[in-house]
Amino acid sequence: MADRPQLHIDGQILDLPLIVGSENERGLDISSLRTKTGTVTLDPGFMNTASTSSAITFLDGEKGILRYRGIPIEELAEKSTFVETSYLLIYGKLPSKPELENFSRLLTRHSLIHEDMKRFFDGYPGTAHPMAILSSMVVSLSSFYPEAVDIKNHEQIDITIGRLLAKVRTIAAFSYKKSIGQPFVYPKNSLSYCANFLNMMFSVPAEDYPVDEETVKALNLLLILHADHEQNCSTSTVRLVGSAQTNLFASISAGVCALWGPLHGGANQEVMEMLDEIHASGQPVDSFIARAKDKRSDFRLMGFGHRVYKNYDPRAKIIKAACDSILKKFGVKDPKLEIALRLEEVALSDDYFIERKLYPNVDFYSGIIYRALGIPTNMFTVMFALGRLPGWIAHWKEQIESPLARIGRPRQIYTGPTLNHYLPMDQRTG
């Protein structure tokens, strides 16, 4: 391709500057296309459209590569913590020891929610999905911190970031406690980020909750692996909402709602519901595998393959090892997990799955681990949101700090009726 590709349309020649990223990704700059030719591009699902340039996450689906700020996900999973990875994503570099200590103290200091917010939980019925509670509680934070609504108040941005990371964990745990009718458990300043969350989820006032370090390690890993994934549906939503200079609380709430969809963050919940269906049927697992291969069947195996990765999901490789370790440590005897392991075995050895690159993905393994840790199925998407939070924040921050930022305004190709006129009621038919 030439350095200055050209588009020939209606007798005009339009230069399309070639933009090359730091990893040699190439894109054509079409920002002047409509102005100069009256033409727009059509790309349903934005599969070939870059809405922005970003320095946060690099993803190569063909090669199975995922890096945060240039650091391979494998290294972060092995050596980092969720709090440190959050700092990396949001502020663009690994923190020094004093920076990490200050950041951790910020999250500890802001972990409580306003006492008035506790009353909000009373207004939700017992059937309320935790994602509905989470999204509304997050946007409600803006009413308690009105100074954060002004995104030009730069002194408040770091505090707002700390508040969100700290309080969303508390809101998520409170949502769970509300759903099972147990009293809320307040955060403890003596515990780390993940240990604090587990304590708020599973301890009760009647007895102490022993924080298991292996469980804390597994939760750190799960959150790191979900922390960012480039311009996915929810991240793009956060950026689009934020492009209107919308405050961080409202932008993140919109991201939570986008993540709720079963094609996005709800995928790990669908995996467990599939296992429930297989178990309830009483039929052999292999019969469901046969149905999945049958083009005439509408049955789908959830948690296999990935829209972006055309190779093995690098996160799945990491999480599989953690999954094996957790199941062994806790000696979990759950028939549904045994079904999952049989599905995994087939997918990694059956030519049908291998040829189609239908490998188990991160959603498949994360659901299994969450179940083993005692986290209920309807909380899985909330856990995804908790993990993805630093990525959303990083993208919102990157956008508002960019001198090239402008409000998002996609175009369309109109396919409706051409000009017609209003008819009085007595002249209408049908």
Image: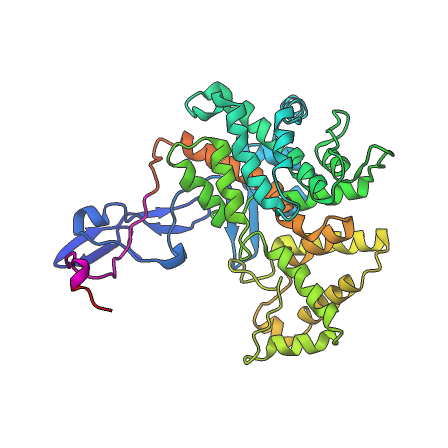
Identified at 55% across, 23% down, the residue is 159
- Is 425 in the magenta? yes
Q: Tell me: 14 left or right of 182.
A: left
Main SS, magenta region, reads loop
Q: Tell me: 48 left or right of 64.
A: left
Image coordinates of residue 65 in percent, x first then y, are 56, 52
Image coordinates of residue 363 in percent, x first then y, are 63, 56
Rendering colour mode: rainbow
Q: Tell me: 152 left or right of 95.
A: left
The quadrant in which the C terminus is found is bottom left
Position of residue 350 relative to residue 344, above or below, is below
Residue 77 position by quadrant: top right
Position of residue 166 relative to residue 39, above or below, is above
Identified at 19% across, 52% down, the residue is 14
Position of residue 374 relative to residue 310, above or below, is above
Residue 78 visible, this orientation: no
Image coordinates of residue 336 in percent, x first then y, are 76, 63
User: Residue extending furthest left?
Assistant: 11
Magenta residues (range): 409-426
Identified at 51% across, 39% down, the residue is 253
Residue 54 position by quadrant: top left
- Which is more toward the observer, 348 or 382? 382
Q: Tell me: 418 left or right of 412.
A: left
The quadrant in which the N terminus is found is bottom left
Residue 199 position by quadrant: top right
